[in-house]
Image (cartoon, rainbow, N blue to C red):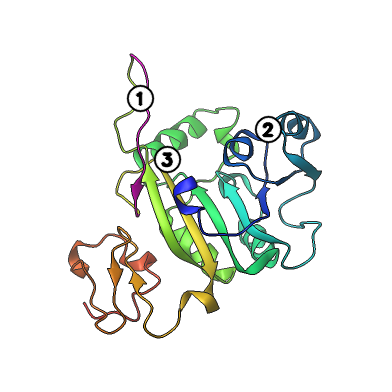
Amino acid sequence: MRRVSELPPRPWIEVEVGTGRFAQALGIDVGVDPAPGALEYAARRGVRVVEAVGQALPFEDGRFGAAFVIVTLCFADEPAILLREARRALTDEGGVVLGIVPAESPWGRLYAEKARSGHFFYSRAKFFTLGEIERLACEAGLTFDLAASTLLRPFFCGGSFAVEPPRDGIHEDAGLVAVLCRREAENSGREGEPLTCMRDNVEVSREDPRCPHPSSQCRFRKLCPIAALIRR
């Protein structure tokens, strides 16, 4: 999550902050959640908490430089409305930072199987594919800008865990993908600014906008915010 959250300015908010595990680690300023018990944990972790739902944030327009939505859309009753509210609360230069467990990844399929087995938490979740998340973001007036991936290793089968460094871009089989979303109007950029490949963040010059990956080999071309501008 840090890999894609270096650019947005302060202050930061986490939507559906829960017990504040991510907010504490990332230094997020404010967290909202409808569960008072969870907010008590978050407050003890040093997060300023507000009891509210993500679909109706109690803040004025343009209040925050970043709105974090980490493994939350899969539990939201109205994910599109939640994303629109997050965008509304952003400053002009701000961004929405998503933490996604893709439904098509091995981890997403594992959690879906747990859901079918009646798991207490995952039975309440609806995991989205990356394409579905991209469409929800688009409906909210957001486009993918930067991405990083982790959890590409096989499932834990014994022994001990090891820290897995994140990789830039969206990678196949990643169990967790972090995405920085920008307002659509800003994502077009100024003439002469480099474009960025969605697959691995390779820069593409506007003067010669050629895709660095043949379309037949790029699994993420439908997610790429520059796809309409580049020559393949």
Camera-nearest label, 2 or 3: 2
- The foreground one among 39 and 71 is 39
Q: Could you say whether the residue bearing mark 2 is in a helix, strand or loop? A: loop
Relative to residue 182, is residue 208 drawn left or right?
left
Disc 2 from disc 3: Cα separation:
22 Å
Contact between marks 1 and 3 (CB within 8 A): the answer is: no
Name the residue located 73 percent from the left edge and 62 percent from the top edge: 63
Q: Position of residue 152 (x, y in %)?
A: 31, 38
- Residue at (29%, 30%) from the top-left corner? 154
Q: Tell me the CA gap for discs 1 and 3.
A: 20 Å
**Mark on residue 162?**
1
Residue, disc 3: 108
- Point out the tag, 2 or 1, that comes first from the N-terminus: 2
Dominant SS of magenta comes to loop
Whether residue 46 is in magenta: the answer is no
Helix, strand or loop at label 3? It is helix
